């Protein structure tokens, strides 16, 4: 691996690693963890860089190239619109089997509870 490529990896890794510090298991509106999503993007970035010629990497402006890669593979930050948050509720009969063992319920019985959705 050439020195410029190694430096580029190190720079990208340093910039990507700060994204992992929060909650690696975060799954906001997604079927996969945020760390898996970042790892996939990082793999694509790594592959893109590895497919560049050594001559190109030696002559390209490193700052501009990093900005180009970052712009192509960045994620939009989710925006939570708190003013649009709402929940509905209704009552329903819940079977005793759905309750934790800490509850004093009888097997085979149902219990009226509020359901929030």
Image: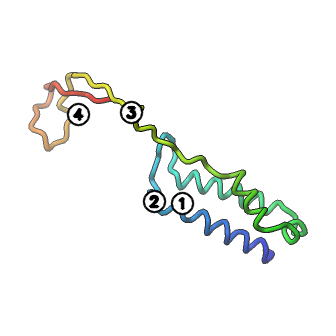
Quadrant of the image occupied by residue 60: bottom right
User: Mark 4: few, some, or many residues within 10 Å (few <14, many ≥20)?
Assistant: few
Residue position for label 4: 98
The N terminus sits in image quarter: bottom right
State how far apart marks 1 and 3 are (Cα): 26 Å
Secondary structure at badge 4 equals helix
Position above or below: 39 against 94: below
In the image, residue 18 lies at what x, y percent? Answer: 54, 64
In this rendering, would 80 be left or right of 55? left
In the image, residue 76 lies at what x, y percent? Answer: 59, 46
**Residue 85, label in figure:** 3
Position above or below: 57 against 87: below
In the image, residue 4 lies at what x, y percent? Answer: 79, 74
- Judged by depth in the image, the label closer to the viewer, 1 or 4, is 1
The C terminus sits in image quarter: top left
State how far apart marks 2 and 4 are (Cα): 33 Å
State how far apart marks 3 and 4 are (Cα): 27 Å
Contact between marks 1 and 2 (CB within 8 A): the answer is yes
Q: Residue at x 78, y 77 (%)?
A: 3
State how far apart marks 1 and 4 are (Cα): 37 Å
Q: Residue at x 67, y 70 (%)?
A: 11
């Amino acid at each position: 691996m050439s020195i410029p490529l190694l430096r580029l990896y190190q720079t990208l890794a340093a910039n990507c690693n700060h994204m992992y510090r929060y909650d690696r298991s975060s799954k906001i509106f997604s079927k996969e963890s945020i760390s898996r999503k970042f790892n996939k993007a990082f793999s694509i970035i790594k592959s893109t860089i590895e497919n560049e010629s050594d001559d190109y990497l030696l002559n390209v402006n490193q700052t501009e190239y990093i900005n180009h890669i970052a712009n192509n593979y960045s994620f939009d930050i989710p925006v939570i619109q708190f003013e649009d948050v709402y929940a509905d509720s209704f009552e329903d009969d819940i079977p005793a089997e759905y309750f934790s063992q800490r509850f004093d319920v009888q097997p085979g019985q149902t219990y009226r509870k509020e359901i929030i959705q």
